Image: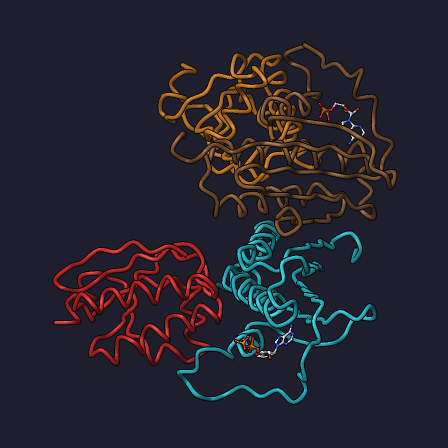
Chain colours: A brown, B cyan, C red, D orange
Amino acid sequence: MTVSSKIELHLPSNMEYLGVPDAVLMEIGSDMDCSKNDLEELGTSVIEACTNAMEHGNQLDDVLSIQVIFEVEGNEITITVLDKGPGFDFEHWTPSDELMRQRGRGILIMREFTDSLEFARHDDGRFMIRMVKKLKPSEDD
Amino acid sequence: MTVSSKIELHLPSNMEYLGVPDAVLMEIGSDMDCSKNDLEELGTSVIEACTNAMEHGNQLDDVLSIQVIFEVEGNEITITVLDKGPGFDFEHWTPSDELMRQRGRGILIMREFTDSLEFARHDDGRFMIRMVKKLKPSEDD
Amino acid sequence: MKLKERKRDGVAILEMSGKLMGGPDSETFDETLKTLIHEGCHNVIVSMERVKWVNSTGLGILISGYTTLKKSGGELKLLKVSDRIENIFIVSKLYTVFESFQDEDEAVQSFS
Amino acid sequence: MKLKERKRDGVAILEMSGKLMGGPDSETFDETLKTLIHEGCHNVIVSMERVKWVNSTGLGILISGYTTLKKSGGELKLLKVSDRIENIFIVSKLYTVFESFQDEDEAVQSFS
Ligand SMILES: Nc1ncnc2c1ncn2[C@@H]1O[C@H](COP(=O)(O)OP(=O)(O)O)[C@@H](O)[C@H]1O
Ligand SMILES: Nc1ncnc2c1ncn2[C@@H]1O[C@H](COP(=O)(O)OP(=O)(O)O)[C@@H](O)[C@H]1O
């Protein structure tokens, strides 16, 4: 089951293509009986993860690609985003609490919108963020 | 330019996911100034190519994946679909002309809806179909 | 693909939604038509307003349904086909086979 | 992201469409506001009905615009924010900063 429901996407590190992972997720979700709100929250989270992978990871060098993996198991979707950058010290990262700050909201948003969020380094050296969200059935909307 | 505008997709050979390459294309097209009709014709063509790759190529074995590559250069989109099957004798393939036949329209539709359509075997042994379409500007709709 | 069935003046209206393609969609459609024929309903309108796309295998499903109903003395007609799908009917020349309407009243009346 | 500008009762209404994210969108938005301020127009409504999504970098663009207008004695307000985007304003607590309306008349009158 896990193997058969894995969709993989490779994108150049160009913000222009940030809509693609969202579109893939919305298409996957269109065939699931799931809350639109939950799906959109996960969509927003994957956009944040890809923004970071392109910008902080691959330094917007569009010769470098990011990889996005979608795994569907029942109503639970796991999304992994990989980039070719150095990563960061996520264990000690704390967000600013300045309300009007211009940046520094991506990780917070992902944390709020997913059930679990995890950073790691892949065996092949790439930096990796993995998020899981169980989508509620659509009746709960 | 060519490198930076290449989007790659891997899908299990499960018809359930036929909407994904179409969704990716529609998202790419949403940022281009192009004819909706042209974009939809190309979308229909990539769905046909993926249907064939999943069904005739990978025999709907969903452990086998198909690969879809989108390359954008200006208003011209090239889409390559690869499967792990034996291919077919495309040089001698002729469609039936029985109007009420149930199958055998995919290649015809792709030919009508794209500017060029080409079958080949990839160096790595996979079977490959490649289509190119230059999308007209949206004013021409 | 999903089907929602209702009836008007003895005509069955099947509201199709989603993506019409091969595989399970074929069975869903065939079974629905068989049940209708069994109930004595041979005239069917497939409303395609909410169909996102059709592939050539999906066309085959409609053709097979058309043939089944024809044989039972009825007909299959189409309603609210989108531009995207109409285009496919045109290049495959199937527009010559299927009667197609944009207005439901007209479609229903065409059977009387 | 694209902007279409119009004016009503001295208030500029910017109809935003597409995806609001970092990069070139930031310049587009800043330039538009600067021109408006230069023309003496300090009250701006950003209509977000046709915005598909916003990422956190896009939020930064709105914040920067808000600050710029505030400094010039005006204000930036939002119109027709979708559920998807409102959700992001909520989790980031920015709903406490931006006044937001669903009705254009109300939004325009709120400046007088
Ligand atoms: N993929 C990544 N590679 C390297 N650093 C990252 C990555 N993702 C996040 N970071 C670091 O975490 C910080 C916080 O990220 P985030 O909350 O998304 O806010 P922002 O991107 O606006 O700074 C970033 O500024 C960056 O230093
Ligand atoms: N990727 C492929 N691998 C193997 N055979 C293929 C492939 N694509 C097409 N074919 C062959 O070409 C034939 C015609 O394809 P098509 O016109 O799409 O109609 P259909 O798929 O309905 O048969 C197929 O029946 C199959 O034999």
Residue A86 drawn above or below residue D64:
below
Residue C48 drawn above or below residue D74:
below
Q: Is residue C106 visible?
A: no
Q: Position of residue B19 (x, y in %)?
A: 54, 55
Front-lying residue, D74 or A60: A60
Q: Is residue A86 visible?
A: yes
Front-lying residue, D78 or C100: C100
- Residue D111 shown left or right of residue A131 in the figure: left
State which quadrant residue A47 falls in. top right
- Residue C82 shown left or right of residue A101 in the figure: left
State which quadrant residue A52 falls in. top right
Q: Residue at x 64, y 46 (%)?
A: A2
Q: Position of residue D96 (x, y in %)?
A: 52, 12
> Residue lying furthest top in this view?
A97
Q: Position of residue C111 (x, y in %)?
A: 16, 71
Q: Residue at x 46, y 29 (%)?
A: D83
Front-lying residue, A17 or A40: A40
Q: Residue at x 71, y 12 (%)?
A: A96
Q: Quadrant of the C terminus of chain A?
A: top left
- Count of marks, rendered view: 0
Ligand 2 lies in quarter: bottom right
- Residue D19 shown left or right of residue B127 in the figure: left
Q: Position of residue B42 (x, y in %)?
A: 57, 65
- Residue A32 shown left or right of residue B10 in the figure: left
